[in-house]
Amino acid sequence: MGDELGLDADDRVDAIEMMTDGWLTALEDHAEGDSEDTFAYTRDVAWGRLDDFLDDVEDERDRDRLLSKWTVDGRLDLASPDLAAALEAWVDGLLAAWPSYVANLDTGLAGEVAWFEVKDVAQRLGAGLGSLGTPRLVVLVEGPTDDDDDDRVLDVKMQGAPAAGEWLPLGGSWTNHAERVVTANRILLNEADDHLGWLAFADGAWSVRERSPWKATLDASYLDSPTRLRKMAAQWGYVLGTAHSRGDVTWDWENAMLEVVRTDPAGFRSQVLTIGTAYADVVRADQEAFAWQVGCPAE
């Protein structure tokens, strides 16, 4: 992002250090007690350009607009470039497995069978970053009433092993990777989606969640100065530190990490900077190689 903004090396270093400090501050704040379980980073606590961004998202997005984007006359809009007709085998598999998903929900919507009546199914196209190309469906369900204007749009995504799974031990009580993803979401979010669950069909395990009407991406145009990037980086660090703190279900992770960092705080900051800078170089090289490959004529 520093490159995209045209910032010099010193400004990029400052931003990384601010993010590191924000992360450490979160650990210090959450080290005593379980405040991370209730803390929410909303526009009431955000500041700088993040506050402006959250205001814009809340003002411009809601479920009505989401439905107008994805549906027409109570059905998914297959004229959308983001949707296509789903494979018949996938639709059949989903409908067969759907009752098990609904029956196993342990959220505020548990037992609301009518809410989850499937009205339409389509394939989602071009979605994801690291998961780009992963099979994904959009499912339209009835919602609280039989009116079309309060339907819910659900994202159903096949889940595989995480990218780092080859090098990390994956212990846990889940039975498949979709359940693993659902478990992680419930831990990391202080108000998890009531639609969050999973089901198995088409030789895979699929996670289910509501497509958030308020999902949006903050682009670099919000951060048009080194000062604004530094302020944003500090908040990104705090959000990340809070998420890491929520993940310590069975042990006191914050204090264990702080004990290590405090032995050499300057060395820790230096290591984060070194890894961040090196990783940015790898991303640039990967992007250039990808662009070159795409630009090459087919043999």
Image (tube, grey):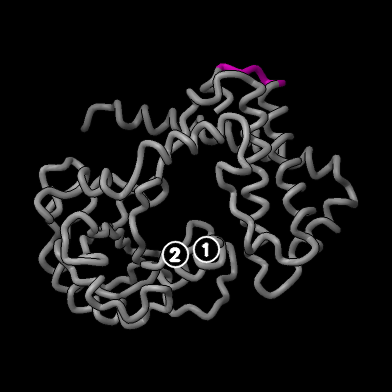
Residue type for callout 2: Ala
Instruction: Let me know if residue 298 is in the magenta part.
Output: no
Label 2 sits on residue: 161
Using the rendered image of the protein, determine whether residue 286 is visible from the camera's viewpoint.
no
Residue 42 appears left or right of 122:
right
Secondary structure type for disc 2: loop
Which residue is rendered at x = 42% and y = 63% of the image? 193
Residue type for callout 1: Gly
Pointer 1: residues within 10 angstroms few (<14), some, or many (20+)? few
Residue 291 appears left or right of 253:
left
| The N terminus lies in quadrant | top right
Q: Position of residue 267 (x, y in %)?
A: 84, 42
Q: CA distance from mark 1 to mark 2?
A: 6 Å
Q: Position of residue 103 (x, y in %)?
A: 32, 83
Residue closest to the eye, 79 or 210:
210
Secondary structure type for disc 1: helix
Residue 185 appears left or right of 240:
left
Q: Quadrant of residue 108?
A: bottom left
Label 1 sits on residue: 165
Residue closest to the eye, 8 or 30:
30
Which residue is rendered at x = 72% and y = 35% of the image? 18
Q: Confirm or deny contact between disc 1 and disc 2 (CB under 8 A).
A: yes
| The C terminus lies in quadrant | top left
Q: Position of residue 213 (x, y in %)?
A: 35, 48
Q: Position of residue 264 (x, y in %)?
A: 88, 47
Which residue is rendered at x = 66% and y = 43% of the image? 237
Magenta-highlighted residues: 6-10
Which residue is rendered at x = 67% and y = 60% of the image? 36
Using the rendered image of the protein, determine whether residue 153 is visible from the camera's viewpoint.
yes
Residue closest to the eye, 17 or 57:
57
Pointer 2: residues within 10 angstroms few (<14), some, or many (20+)? few
